[in-house]
Amino acid sequence: TEIFAVHGVPDVVHADRGTSMTSKHVSTLLADLEVVRSHSRPKVSNDNPYSESLFKTLKYGPEFPERFGSLYHAREFMASFVHWYNH
């Protein structure tokens, strides 16, 4: 309610079917404010399950660092990960 007071009430909110968007409180609030929930993202025809799976494998892997020390470190890590993933 505070955020809507500051920024105004949007016409449409993308609801990704996550827990916060499917909870009764958020659903009720949006309905009370006459905000439409969209289940498709703008300019995205569909989600690619292969890229989603790759991203989760990358992000939740035990070697994924909390932070990269540099661009070189990030590139080095990704080169190693892609080689491991493909072979």
Image: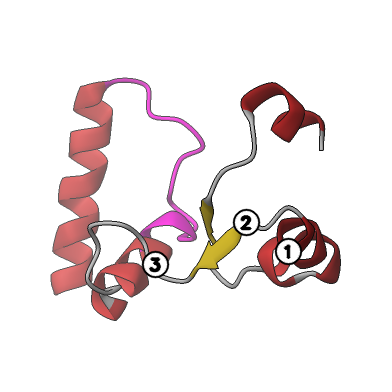
Q: Dot 2 lies on which element?
A: loop
Residue 45 drawn at (x, y percent): 22, 71
Callout 2: 10 Å neighbours few (<14), some, many (20+)? some
Rendered residue at 34%/69% (across/down): 52
Q: Residue at x 77, y 60 (%)?
A: 26
Circles 1 and 2: CB atoms closer than 8 Å: yes
Q: Which residue is mark 2?
A: 35
- Helix, strand or loop at mark 3: helix
Q: Which mark is residue 31?
A: 1
Which residues fall within the magenta stretch? 58-70
**Could you say which quadrant of the image residue 20 lies in?**
bottom right
- Residue type for callout 1: Ala
Give the answer, above or below, for where 10 lies relative to 4: below
> Which of the 4 image quarters holds residue 8?
top right
Whether residue 70 is visible here, answered yes or no, is: yes
| Residue at 19% over, 25% down | 72
- Image point (30%, 79%), residue name: 49
Residue 1 horizontal/vertical position (percent)? 81, 38
Residue 11 in the image: above or below residue 68: below
Q: Which mark is residue 57?
A: 3
**Colour pattern:** secondary structure
Please state if 36 lies on the left or on the right of 25 as rendered: left
